[in-house]
Image: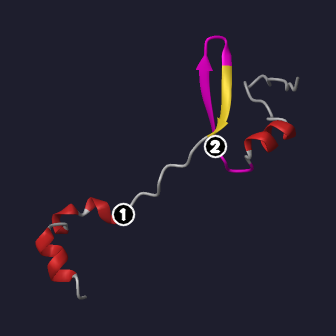
């Protein structure tokens, strides 16, 4: 069994064998799933990149696509 200590600030280091098993490295996010008295750690899936132009839906009609298709 692999273990690590909890600091006074409720932080811990994920041991190297666990990081390797999860395929995580600096900057990656960890997801926690609580299942009764167990907690399951997994590598969090990244959200798809937001499309900054998705907000401008006022120019997203069929007529607009046809008008700008050859630009």
Q: Residue furthest left?
A: 63
Q: Residue 63: image x %, image y %?
A: 11, 73
Compared with residue 64, is residue 17 higher up or lower down, i.e. above or below?
above
Q: Residue 26: image x %, image y %?
A: 73, 50
Question: Which label is found at residue 52?
Answer: 1
Compared with residue 60, is residue 43 higher up or lower down, i.e. above or below?
above
Of the numbered discs 2 and 1, the one sitting upstream in the chain is 2
Question: Which label is found at residue 14?
Answer: none
Question: Which label is found at residue 29?
Answer: 2
Compared with residue 25, is residue 44 higher up or lower down, i.e. above or below?
above
Q: Residue furthest top?
A: 37
Mark 2, Cα crowd under 10 Å, few <14 / some 14-19 / many 20+, is: few
Rendering colour mode: secondary structure
| Residue beneath the point at 78% across and 22% down | 8
Compared with residue 36, is residue 10 higher up or lower down, i.e. above or below?
below
| Residue beneath the point at 36% across and 63% down | 52
In magenta, the rendered stretch is 25-38
From mark 2 to mark 1, how far is it between C-alphas?
23 Å
Residue 45, by quadrant, is: top right
Q: Quadrant of the N terminus?
A: top right
Question: Going by the image, does 3 lie left or right of 39?
Answer: right
Question: Going by the image, does 12 lie left or right of 2?
Answer: left
| Residue beneath the point at 74% across and 29% down | 11
């Amino acid at each position: 069994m692999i273990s690590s200590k909890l600091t006074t600030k409720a932080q811990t280091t994920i041991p190297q064998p666990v990081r390797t098993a999860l395929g995580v490295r600096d900057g990656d996010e960890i997801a926690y799933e609580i299942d009764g008295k167990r907690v399951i750690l997994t590598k969090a899936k990244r959200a798809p990149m937001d499309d900054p132009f998705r907000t401008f839906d006022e120019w997203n009609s069929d007529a607009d696509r046809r008008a700008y298709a050859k630009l």
